[in-house]
Image (cartoon, rainbow, N blue to C red):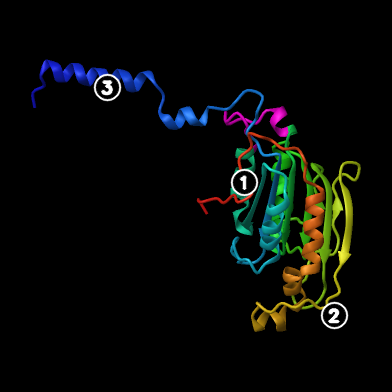
Amino acid sequence: MSWSRQSRVAMLAVVFTCSAFPPLSHAIDTAVLPNQPAAPSNIVIGFVGGFVRHDNHHHGPVEVAQHIRKTAPRGTYIQVFENRRRSQARETVLRLLDANHDGVLSPQEKGRAHIVLFGQSWGAAAAVSLARDLKREGIPVQLTVQVDSVAKLWQNDSIIPDNVAQAVNFYQTQGIIHGRRRITAADPTKTEILGNYFMDYRKNPAACTQYPFWDRVFTPGHMQSECDPHLWSQIETLVEQHLSPTTNPAALSSRNASDSSR
């Protein structure tokens, strides 16, 4: 194919124009206003137990997240993950804290972290494991909440790492699956254990009408810890009490945050 002189000149003009200006997406990504970091004022991460999906509305962690979104300070990021998605949750936290998007968390960015982690069953153990992951990054956690925590073989859900300021544990003993009875602090001078609270569902049963028959027969207590409205209302209040009221005008609008990659 032969090119006329006019065509070659036009092509050179296009090449020069494209190289002189960054792509639009790059210009948007780096357009952060001075002194207005884009990190959320709060990060709340929940984990569901078993093989439950992160958007199953019949499960406690999902319901709590929905309720908190309605009242949380603007700029609060709230998301629920499957317990097997802990690495994705970790990457999400690191991305959210990276206010200047340079791929490296500065001491200032880490220091601004205000993180609450909670979960039920395998999800509770995942919350503790994520706190331990964040400790390795030098990132503090305000609160961890464990509900009938069940650890996988390679996990340790009984000792709370010292980057966590406060931790609380709820457990029950009915059925073939029941949670961790006691959690302790790796360093009691840095972590306050708010309590290890026993839930007696024999005396105070919780109605779980959406759950299958085999859960009612084989794991009644564990099932009730997942759907107990009184318990999850307490957890909702506890989480809300640990949220910073600071409003970050440049934080991403995350009350209805969702991760399309899952």
Task: State how far apart marks 3 and 2 are (Cα).
Answer: 75 Å
Main secondary structure found in the magenta portion = loop
- Estimate how packed mark 1 is, as few (under 14), some (14 to 19) or many (20 or more) residues with alpha carbons within 10 Å: some
Give yes or no for contact between labels 1 and 2 (Cβ–Cβ under 8 Å): no
Amino acid residing under circle 1? Ser
137 vs 99, nearest the viewer? 99
Across and down, in percent, residue 115 comes to 73, 44
Q: Secondary structure at mark 3?
A: helix
Give the mark nearest the N terminus, 3 or 2.
3
Query: Is residue 153 visible in this depiction of the protein?
Result: no
The crowd level at tag 3 (other Cα within 10 Å; few <14, some 14-19, many 20+) is few
Taking the image as shown, residue 185 lies to the left or right of residue 260, namely right
Q: CA separation, marks 1 and 3? A: 39 Å
State the separation of the CA atoms marked 1 and 2.
39 Å
Which residue is more in the foreground, 203 or 75? 75
Residue 119 visible, this orientation: yes
Residue marked by disc 1: 254
Q: Provide residue 229's location: percent of width, then percent of height.
A: 77, 69
Establish if 192 lies above or below 219: above
| Of 67 and 21, the residue lying toward us | 67
Relative to 157, say whether 247 is above or below.
Answer: above
Query: In what element is the residue under mark 2?
Result: loop
Q: Position of residue 89 (x, y in %)?
A: 62, 49
Residue 158 placement: quadrant: bottom right
Q: Which mark lies nearer to you, 1 or 2?
A: 1
Q: Which mark is residue 202?
A: 2
> Which mark is first along the chain, 3 or 1?
3
The stretch in magenta equals 97-110
Tag 3 residue: 14
Comparing labels 3 and 2, the label whose residue is closer to the camera? 3
